[in-house]
Image: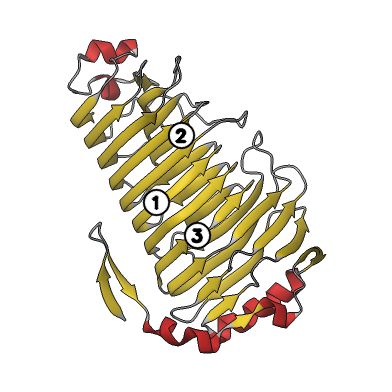
Amino acid sequence: MIPWVSSFGVKFLLWPERASAASRAINVDNFGAVGDGIANDRGALTRALAAWQIQGGRLEFTPGKTYWLGSVDRESDMFLIPQLPPGAALIGNGATLVVGVSGLKTRLFLFRFHLFEGLLIEGLNIQGIGGDSRINWQGTYFCTLDGALPGRALNFSLRNVEVRDCVAMLYVGGGIIRVSGITIHSCSAIRCYYGLVFHENGDEVEAAFSAIDCRRAYFPYGVNYHRVSIDVAHGSTFPGANACILIKRYTLDTRDIVVTANFKGPEFPWKSAVKLELQNDASAAIEGVTIDAVVCDPPRQLAMAALSFSDLSSEGVPYRGREKHEFSGIAFSCRGFPTSSLLVENETPQCAQATVTVDPAQIREGRVGPAVNLVAMSARSG
């Protein structure tokens, strides 16, 4: 293992096994995959993945081919991979995987990985079929990192991947071990419900990706140390969620997140660009969040707020408990919001007492002007 520090200061491990991985490369076509977009290649890929789990190295697809993986009508994992040797790599070479779902609220997890060290996924195109953006979470989750087994889930890289018409490009969850050391570069989520989701798991993340016509680009909660750059574009009738970027706290505190987001229209279907939200009945905190949001070439009428935040109980109603809820160390800047506003939703005394660099009365009125700068904002109760 060779230590390496990224430009963001995150320390990762590079795996020398990859240097000799080419000699251990296997191709899905050797296991009977056709790749004509018509024949069902799920069985061939299942066999290839089984060999890959034992052998490690590179599992490759053939450039230019389209692999049809069939459709499912109930929630399931198509390819469940409990453990991989260190330095394993799934290399698409620009190939396309097509997978479908049928049935109301059917969720398909295409690839679910549990234990790995230095896993790379590169050069794949994913096309989902049968998902419905109007129905929450119906469709395909491309890649899931699941910390639900004891062991190690360290250093995952997603590069040059395009995911279309799916629920999420990447979903990280599981509560037994922490998944950490995640890098995402030159990836795109197109017409997806989510771009990236971190569900109480996924630390030390460095990501740069595009979210095009997505309901929600980035949704982290219960995580530590994220450095994320997002290019957001929306130009269709594809619906938006209440916020394009939702940074939340459910069970675990959310800390140390830096986000740069560039928004391009012509449509902005979200109520706010960024939302910070606490939802818990116990003590809860979102701490150390820095956000820079920029609207490029804004339309004449822009109703989307720059930032909103809310404080909820576990049942989703305004929090009025006695336990301490806290937003602290929040730095927010925005540019290009001609009708920029800062919204306090589900208003409680905790949120209303936020101290910012603008008049708090303007916050309650929902408008603060064309340029907002919040530095070391805090909202405390208890």
- Asked whether, in this view, residue 72 is left or right of residue 229, the answer is right
Camera-nearest label, 1 or 2: 1
**Is residue 150 among what the camera can see?**
no
Residue contact between numbered discs 2 and 3, judged by CB atoms under 8 Å: no
Going from N to C along the chain, the mark reached first, 3 or 1, is 3
Say which residue appears at 35% left-offset and 22% top-offset: 337
How much space separates mark 2 and mark 3, taking CA atoms?
23 Å
Image mark for residue 379: none
Q: How is the image coloured?
A: secondary structure
Q: Is residue 75 above or below residue 28?
A: above
Q: Residues within 10 Å of mark 1 (few under 14, many from 20)?
A: some
Going from N to C along the chain, the mark reached first, 1 or 2, is 1
Q: Residues within 10 Å of mark 3 (few under 14, many from 20)?
A: some
- Mark 2: amino acid: Cys
The percent position of residue 25, horizontal first and vertical second, equals 56, 84
How much space separates mark 1 and mark 2, taking CA atoms?
16 Å
Image mark for residue 160: 3
Q: Quadrant of residue 66?
A: bottom right
Image mark for residue 208: 1
- Mark 1: amino acid: Ala
Residue contact between numbered discs 1 and 2, judged by CB atoms under 8 Å: no
The percent position of residue 38, horizontal first and vertical second, equals 82, 62
Going from N to C along the chain, the mark reached first, 2 or 3, is 3
Q: Judging from the image, what secondary structure is the residue with disc 3 in? A: loop
- Asked whether, in this view, residue 292 is left or right of residue 155, the answer is left
Say which residue appears at 48% left-offset and 54% top-offset: 187
The percent position of residue 264, horizontal first and vertical second, equals 45, 32
Q: Judging from the image, what secondary structure is the residue with disc 2 in? A: strand
The percent position of residue 259, horizontal first and vertical second, equals 32, 43
Say which residue appears at 44% left-offset and 43% top-offset: 219
